[in-house]
Image (cartoon, rainbow, N blue to C red):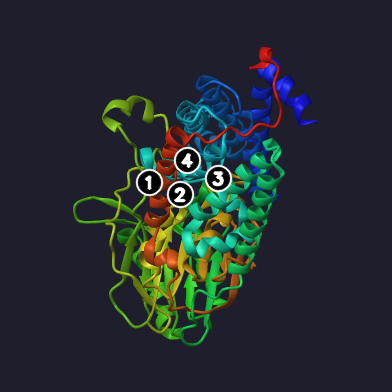
Amino acid sequence: MLRKYSYKIQAHPWIGDLLSLLFGGLLVFAFAPYNYFPLAILSPAILFFLWHKITPLRAFWRGWLYGIGMFGMGVSWLHISLDQFGGIGLYLAWGLTGLFVLGLATYIGLIGWAVIRLFPKCDSTRLLFVLPAAWVIMEWLRSWLFSGFPWLLLGYSQLDAPLSGFAPLAGVYGVSWAAAFSASLLVYLALSQDQHKSLIMGLTLAALWLGGGALSFVKWSNPLGDPIEVALVQGNIAQEMKFAHDHKDDITQRYLEMSKKHLSAELIVWPETAIPDFYHRSIPIIEDIRKLAKENNTDFVVGIAYKDEDENQYNAAVLIDNELTTDRFYYKQHLVPFGEYMPFRRYLEVMLDFIKIPFSDFTAGNAYQPLFSVAGQHVVSTSICYEDAFSWLVRQHAKHSSFLINISNDGWFGDSIAASQHLQIARMRALETGRFLLRSTNTGISAIINSEGEIVQQSNTFEPSVLHGQIIPNDKATLYSLTGNIPLLFIMFFAIGVGIIRHYFWHIPPVQAVNMPSRYQ
């Protein structure tokens, strides 16, 4: 069977190209809301196999097609915010989204080109050392280069699979490596005719998954004090009316009335920009919240915009503490390009004027800001919306925190898979850090997530709701919280270095499944 299909792909390269595009698209079904996690092993395994016996240029082409399928299916929802809420029109929105997809796909194309160029022989070095490491480095680069877009990282797909056990040790990139290494082992097993080596690789694959499963039972954090009663308010304000000035009072009154039914909670959280105006223009509603807080011994964390004396605008969360008269703020650090700030404004000002998104001229907050103390002085780390996609940003304060808060608004992306994908990312942050995470959103999905990354409660999308429950604060940091991504990245670069030595100086024989006729080589 393998010989038959290998011959066809070698004789008709377009078949391999088409399969690359197809399996790139299928990879999206490994992520939320579908969660067919084995596809995150099978799909890259097919790509690694399709990189067998081809030129570097062809490897780039197939990697690029794979990325087009993956990101074209996985992040096409970006056009919704550009069209419906950015006001640039459907065709231009699809055009800009398409360019974004093509750019992201280039990362995978470059991995294919570089690996095949430097490691032309498909041997154990390329499959077991280089490809998994190169995949992780590619994801890491994609997470920060040009502002970064750490979406659809392979590790997210494994949250409900045994490989998730590696997250508290090495973060989402460690889980990505485990998935990519599993894919490489499958390709090795498919190509190898050496039964002894195949047995070793099969046992290695089994040990990897059993080890991940065993790690899932390890308790990485310790309870700290009594449970905390919390309430997360989801107002479900339609995005098209959320920032309309004449709706401001109705919006804030909705949040107040919903909160009044849950004042027994020690902490009440409202979502990102729940008050759709600047803090200094919202003092009356702030005072109403403060009154409720003091009368009921309740703290509030509320999303709002803030403008300082120098006219700098911030996407902020404000802590209204029932014991303090001065409010505390967290200013969002990692802003969304073209949504919260306009990069290259000097050069693209004419084009960017077409994009009419409210509060699109924010200033980034400082990297190290004081943490909030809430609900009996438990220290909490706060992030706003897209920030929870950056593992390094969340972990830098998580080790000093009792639990995590993320306030968000996925209403920009309508009734798409974006909300489910974002919730999956938030779950990974809880698992990596060993902390409960409170996720309060405007239109859903709001959730209480425990320190194992499991959903305790969640809301439905596009419904007003309040999640009222208990969380357990924790005080012991996971290994990932303490060390971050640096150790894993060092290992990945070391693996590629070892691969270079093995490939060029140790003369490892290639893995051969079939003796290809000369006309196919």
At a point 45% along the width and 40% down the height, the residue shown is 499
Q: Which residue is mark 4?
A: 134
Q: CA distance from mark 3 to mark 1?
A: 27 Å
Q: Amino acid at mark 1?
A: Phe
The mark closer to the camera, 2 or 3, is 3
* Vertical side of 255 occupied by 307: above or below: above
* Circle nearer the viewer, 4 or 2: 4
Residue 163 visible in the current orientation: yes
Q: Mark 3 or mark 1, which is nearer to you?
A: 3
Q: Depth-wise, is mark 2 or mark 1 nearer the camera? A: 1
Q: Is residue 350 above or below residue 74?
A: above
Q: Earlier in the sequence, mark 2 or mark 3?
A: 3
Tell which circle, 4 or 2, labels the residue nearer the N-terminal end. Answer: 4
Q: Nearer the viewer, residue 511 or 444?
A: 511
Q: Earlier in the sequence, mark 2 or mark 1?
A: 2
The answer for how far apart the CA atoms under marks 4 and 1 are is: 38 Å
The numbered mark at residue 243 is 2
As measured in the structure, the alpha-carbon distance from the residue carrying label 4 to the one carrying label 2 is 43 Å
